[in-house]
Image (cartoon, coloured by chain):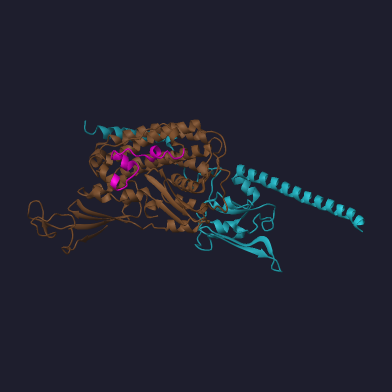
Chain colours: A brown, B cyan
Amino acid sequence: MKTTVVEPPVPSGAPVGLPAGDGRFSLLPKTSFDGRVETELLEVAMGPHHPSTHGVFRMDVVLDGETIVKLKPVFGYLHRNHEKIAENVSYLASIPYTDRLDYLCSMTNNWAYALSVEKLAGLEPPERAEYIRVIMAELTRLANHVCLIGFLAQDMGALGTPLMYGFREREKILDLFEALSGSRMMCNYMRFGGCRLDLPPGWVREARVVVDNFPKFLEEFDNLLSGNEILMARTQGVGVLTAELAVNAGITGPMLRASGVNYDIRKVDRYGIYDRFEFRVPLGDHGDVYDRYMIRLLEMWESLKILRQALDDIPEGPVMDPNAKIRNFKPKPGECYERIEGPKGELGFYLVSDGGANPYRYRVRPPSLVNLTVLEDMCLGHNVADAVAILGSVDIVLGEVDR
Amino acid sequence: MLGEGIIKGMAETARNFIGSYSDPERLVTVQYPEEHIPAKQNARNFPFLVFDVEDPVAGLRCVACKICEKECPPQCIYIVMDRDDKGKPCKHPKVFDIDVSVCMSCQICVEVCPFDAIKMDTEFELSETNRYGGLLLTKDRLSKSNEYYHKIHSVEAAEVDARLADEKAKAEEKVKAKLAAAATAKAAAQAAKPVAG
């Protein structure tokens, strides 16, 4: 970790956070509480290789003692030119690249992109494909939230145990993905107009076993963490995000709902066939880190409800729209934006077609990046150790933030 | 009581710890280099080329149409079509290289291939000491027999074989019908000739 002493800034514009006492701008030197020891602000670069940043991400934190007075997120280390690449390859060839946006949730990334292209080209996925997509999306949500809670606990010092329990359950979901799509994480499974393959024989039975055993694990997680006094002390009242700020900053997903705003795109847009399933949207009350943890836990219970209904109702039939073409796919000129409720928030794809084989413009609306913009507002006034917990509760994947 | 939650959590950990000695449900790992988890039916890693009869050169299904080269997202396929002495294209790849250090195992090449010539392998222990040449798979290293394909993806290979046989039968029928039509036309022309003469 690099530490540097902040130089006294030139007095122009707003100071770095501390109010000037006697009307005169003074930042350094400053006296501490007892009026004797002189202290200085300290700038700390947390990252890019800090283990709590979940990838290559840097927080430039200005500290007054242990208290954060300024925080600047610095990202872009993992920039891969995703949008420009997608503008130079065919519509089909950007599906494997969308896997690598949020690499924990490749299925939902595929779905958001496929939905966008389907709207552009006027394709209609068959009934069975819609059911498969819902099942995949909810399994992805389970895998993602399990990971998130594990990593959050690990960031706060629970070395490995919750994370490993979470990974054990996630492994079973990844096995289902592998049996279906051939790959555990980079699934590359959904296509515009449906899905690439039909479910292999016996898959629904295996999936039902995983879904039926999951509540046992969620109760285990609940016993392990929810009532833990250390976790409560570290998270309750920490990193509060008010509903106003969350709405104004465009925060979506579990973070927004933890602040008490009832906004779930599965309920609002009812894309796919989500209007057929009965589920509730859990809402938080305080908007702190503990609420964000709890929302994810409750969302997993709701996902299990959806999964049970979908696995019971899944019809037989084709999984691909017969009008969908793999080669020489050229949608009509036009533009569209489609969004889904990904595990991390609103994931949307904006596409402009000029009638050619490549999109003219391709833009991703990543939930991780937008949710990261309020990091400073949540961290100000808290200890530097709390910044780790707050960042963990935002749920970022740097592949999606930097693209 | 303060600390109740921690004790409850510890009990959960203890149950898992003891369970890991007795409950097979909690034993989820395998001793990897000695033990292997069998590959799934749909498992995929890197592409290979299928050849049909004994001969890995003449039996190659690939006709060097370069569709996969064009569609490959990271552009890791390089194909040169073979030409005979007169410079006529031979419908056979002279060079077919896949750089597996670039390949991202996405299976797009398999999907776009109209000849079922390229398929996905399941082999994953591919470490090499030579960083550049070792990871550039050339045509002779990529060519694998149809039997091998049946061994790793039995269901899919059977489907492909049935489809190819069907297509072949249809093509033969078409050729036969064409020949028959030509024969009848010729006969009709011969029959019409004396009248015209």
Can see residue B135? yes
Q: x, y percentage for residue A109? A: 44, 47
Quadrant including the N terminus of chain A: bottom left
Residue projecting furthest to the bottom = B86
- At horizontal 24% and vertical 43% (from top left) the residue drawn is A240
Foreground of the two, B133 or A40: A40
Please identify the residue farthest to the front as the structure is shown: B196
Write the start and end of the magenta stretch as one range: A247-272
Q: Decide if residue A18 is on the left or right side of residue B75.
A: left
- Residue B143 on the magenta segment: no
Residue at image position (61%, 42%) is B155
Q: Quadrant of residue A274?
A: top left
Depicted A212 relative to depicted B125: above or below: above
Q: Say above or below: A215 vs B132.
A: above
Numbered marks: total: 0
User: How far across and down, in percent of the image, does residue A285 sit?
Assistant: 26, 36
- Pick whichever, A376 or A147, lies toward us: A376
Quarter the C terminus of chain A occupies: bottom left
Q: Position of residue A135 (x, y in %)?
A: 47, 37
Asked if residue B22 can be seen in this view, the reply is no
- In the rendered image, residue A97, in percent from the top left (x then y), is placed at 46, 53
